[in-house]
Amino acid sequence: MVARALWKGFLTFGEITCPVILYTAVSSSERVRFNIINRKTGNKVRREYVDSGSGEPVERDDQVKGYEVEKDQHIIIEPDEIAAIVPESDKTMRVSDYIPSSEIDTVFLDKPYYLIPDKVGEEAFVLLRDALVRSNVAAIAHAVLFRRLRTLLIRPHGNGLIASTMNFDYEVRSAEEAFEAAPKVHIEGEMLDLAKHIIATKKGSFDPKEFDDRYDTALMELVQAKAEGKTIKPVKEPKVDSTSSLLEALRESAGVAGKTRARTAAKSRAAGSAKAGKKSASGERRKAG
């Protein structure tokens, strides 16, 4: 594995312990990054902390953390005071519970990490991995990672495990409050059938290689075009959908709009012909009378 190990320690479940290594599963290092440049000189701009009152630069040794208790009034917290409350790490990831995979609420998942066995202990590692698969559960574990006590969700993935740090309950906003204003509309009939048809025709499999970061790609193309002295073409604005109704938009999406319009037109012609026939028959009866 090319990535550098972020953490080495032990994974324990019950009375079983195995040494493990934690690697980052996600990296943003491949994204396009910019420096801030002085337009006049072409030099990079350096960030600097300044005093909000005097406007003077503040040296690094004079920079301390402060907690605002009232406007512009802070309690100063010294670096050694913060260091004193950082939980001690015994380099152990302890499994406390197992939960059904169907009960995992993904909104609580934070960052994923790859967990693999370290040299010895492969048998215990494989035992836990396969037991999680057979039982269709995930493990809840606790460990001191990155200076904080973390809760992790451990799930089997391929030949290894994925350990995802979890958001705390107070960090996750209430879904009920967020969806309180969501419309309570019941839809049945043709609209629902058309929506189901569209979903059925677009079913696929999960392949992350097909997901394109269009913004990052566009940024790189812009950089290359400017480096080559090419003219930058303005981006065309998307066309506004002219459909007059949700039902019509669904018919267009499902490719049945033309057929529906043809059927509607045929029904209208048939109705018109029938109406004309009735009028003609009525006139003939009046003449005969």
Image: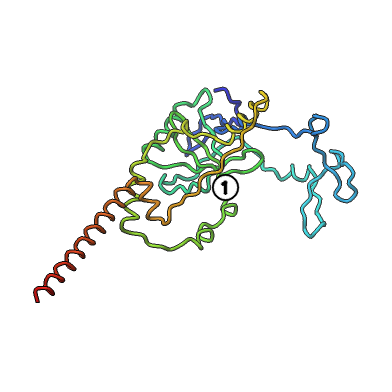
Quadrant where the N terminus lies? top right
- Asked which quadrant contains residue 19, the reply is top right
- Asked which quadrant contains residue 264, the reply is bottom left
Residue drawn at (40%, 33%) of the image: 130
Q: Residue furthest front?
A: 287
- How are the residues colored? rainbow
Position in image of residue 102 (x %, y %):
40, 47
Q: Using residue 22 as the reference point, say whether residue 209 is left or right of it.
A: left
Task: Work out whether residue 135 or residue 72 is closer to the camera in this orientation and state it.
Answer: 72
Q: Amino acid at mark 1?
A: Asn
Task: State whether residue 117 is above or below residue 102.
Answer: above
Position in image of residue 284 (x %, y %):
12, 70
Residue drawn at (75%, 45%) of the image: 82
Name the residue tied to disc 1.
167
Quadrant where the C terminus lies? bottom left
Task: State whether residue 252 is above or below residue 69.
Answer: above
Position in image of residue 42 (x %, y %):
80, 29
Label 1 crowding class (10 Å Cα cut-off): few <14, some 14-19, many 20+? Answer: some
**Total number of numbered labels?**
1
Task: Work out whether residue 33 or residue 78 is closer to the camera in this orientation and state it.
Answer: 33
Task: Work out whether residue 193 or residue 69 is closer to the camera in this orientation and state it.
Answer: 193
Task: Work out whether residue 262 or residue 18 is closer to the camera in this orientation and state it.
Answer: 262
Position in image of residue 225 (x %, y %):
64, 27
Q: Using residue 129 as the reference point, say whether residue 39 is left or right of it.
A: right
Residue drawn at (57%, 53%) of the image: 172
Residue drawn at (28%, 55%) of the image: 265
Circle 1 sits in a helix, a strand or a loop, which is it?
Answer: loop
